[in-house]
Image: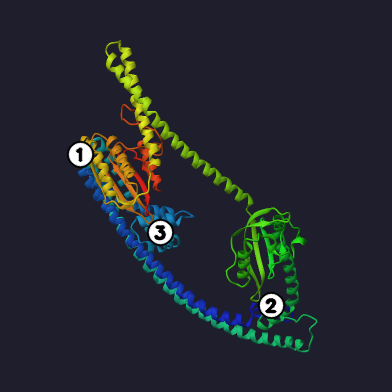
Amino acid sequence: MSSSGTSTSWLGKSSISAKLVAIVLVFVTVIAAVIGLFILAYNISVGVRAYVGGEGMWSKGQKDAVYALSRYISSQDERDYRDYLTAIALPLGDRAARLEMEKPVFDRATVAAGFVQGGNGVEDIDDMIFLFRHFKGIPYFSQAIEIWRQAEQQVLQLPLVAEDARARIATGQLGAAEQVAFLQRIQHINALVTPLEQQFSQLLAAGAREVQALLLTVTLATAVALIAIGVLFAWSISRDLRASISGLRDGVQRVAMGVMTQAIPVRSSDELGELADAFNQMTASRRRTETALLSANEFRERVMESATNAIYTIDLDGRFVTANRRTCEITGYALDELIGRPWTDMVRESDLPELHAGFVSTIQGREPLTNREVPLRRKDGSEVSITFSIAPLSRDGVIHGVVGAAEDITKRKRAEEEIKTHAEELTRSNRELEQFAYVASHDLQEPLRTVTGFAQLLSRRYTGKLDAEADEFIGFITTGVARMKSLIEDLLAYSRVQREHQAAGVVALDEVLATALANLGGAIGAAGARVTHSPLPALAVDPHQFAQLFQNLIGNAIKFRRESAPVVHLGAEQRPNHWLFSVADNGIGIDAASAERVFMLFHRLHTRDQYEGNGIGLTICKKIVELHGGRIWVEPTPEGGSGTVFHFTLPAAA
């Protein structure tokens, strides 16, 4: 750009609109500066008010802490100690905020948390931070901060006194003399802090008055100075505008003479100068545009060729116009063979009507084809499975073809078929295993009865007639046979859950629970148990299996009890898509490490000498719940706690 005859000053290089805007900006700056000073004064006032209010909360927390701690030393009641902790948290929160703000780089969240803990309002935190960070060097405020530190040093003695007193109370070493000594220490601390609190408030108030008076003086002086500068600036701009118009006249005359083969001299940077400069930049811009277009075409071609999916365009007649390398690989055609070939040659006759209707819908601007899965016939006659989408291509609002993308999903389809086959095989295998378990456990009943009968006969005839070792062996036989009988019966019961599961109409679970409680009547009476329940819904479940579910869960709660009488509660809560049931007890509990294993077949957490059973009851519960579309889990007992809570869900439409 030529700058011949152009003023080297900033005003000479600026546009007319910029000069006018500059005048406005000067006066806006004057107004903004005055407003900014008033806002600063307001923020300082708000910050001082917040600190004074915070000092009141600080003082109240300190006084409450002194009172609660004194009362705790006298009463030794833990509630008084908790009141002390609540009260002392206020000054300690302010201390945490102050220590964080004194760092060169502070964490606002930490400061905010400290001030909120200290009872300060969330809306005042930013003003308090601003006042502390920017005015801590002012004498009044720095003195107030120093008093704050001194008061904190005294207040920090209270936790030491509290810890010492609490330790003595815990060991029973707090006598009357020690109580008096502790109370005197607390009162001494309180006496030292009270005058410091008063000095803090007085210093902040005095400092606020002085700063506000100073800001008012500075505001008035600044306003007068800025107005004078604005007037001078406006006069200077008007003078430069006259000079710019004179220089522009020479440039217009050169253009009027038809001299278009050379650049128009730019004599100023205002709107007319920008017009001359735009003409000079036109040819350069044209060259840059052509270069960018070539680069964009090269980039598009590289992207299409490196894409892992097929990308192509088709005209309104259904013939390929462009295609990338992946399109050729999927179809088996070379690029020159593919261009101009109709897509209808590559699909089955049975799929053609539906696909053609979708193609017509797309080129007519209606609903496009998206994520459509279809077999594609390759050049060699083989078929691959693809999923593709197409969208209309338009120019000036007129559709002239479609652009599409396709993915070869042949391997994925083959994998899905293999997974489906494996799943069917696994289902069949599970059915056979369940059938085997049922048949095996059922067919073992007869030989087991024979063994049981002879073992009992052997025990009756020969117990006490042989030596002690023989009696022990006979006992082992009868015990082992009884255990085997119990295991086979449990295994048979487990296999029946799947075999005998049947869909049923809606039943009232309150009635099902009543059946389970009737079955457990003897155990409940013997243990002195108390079983309660919330109102239960009516759902479509197998009533016999759910009676067994309730019976197993409540029976376990009664079996695994502590010395106190068992208390069991069955609750039900409706959620958006399901019902959540819970069975809670006050028994011995289950630790977190066993929370998953308790549902395993024949898994026991205790020896048979402690609790009878084979460890299959919860496995049956899990099977019943899962057959009804839900899930079951146990809430581990907290460390040092007691009781167990079993949860299970059922679909709302179950």
Task: For marks 2 and 3, give the one nearer the viewer.
Answer: 2
Q: Label 2 belongs to which residue? A: 8
The image quadrant that residue 584 belongs to is top left
* Element marked by disc 3: helix
Instruction: Point out residue 160 in the picture as x, y percentages from the top left corner.
Output: 31, 43
Q: Label 3 belongs to which residue? A: 142
Within 10 Å of disc 1 (Cα), the crowding (few <14, some 14-19, many 20+) is few
Q: Label 1 belongs to which residue? A: 177
Within 10 Å of disc 3 (Cα), the crowding (few <14, some 14-19, many 20+) is some
Q: Which residue is rendered at x = 38% and y = 61% of the image?
A: 122
194, 621: nearer the viewer: 621
For the residues labelled 2 and 1, say whether their Cβ atoms are less than 8 Å apart: no
Of the residues shown, which amino acid type is indicated by label 3?
A: Ser
Name the image colouring.
rainbow
Of the residues shown, which amino acid type is indicated by label 2?
A: Thr
* Element marked by disc 1: helix
Within 10 Å of disc 2 (Cα), the crowding (few <14, some 14-19, many 20+) is few
373, 229: nearer the viewer: 373
**CA–CA distance in space, label 2 to label 1:** 90 Å
Instruction: Point out residue 364 in the picture as x, y percentages from the top left corner.
Output: 62, 73
Of the residues shown, which amino acid type is indicated by label 1?
A: Ala
Q: Quadrant of the N terminus?
A: bottom right
- The answer to whether residue 151 is seen in the rendering is no
145 sits left or right of 158 in the view: right
388, 76: nearer the viewer: 388
Q: Which residue is rendered at x = 72% and y = 68% of the image?
A: 292
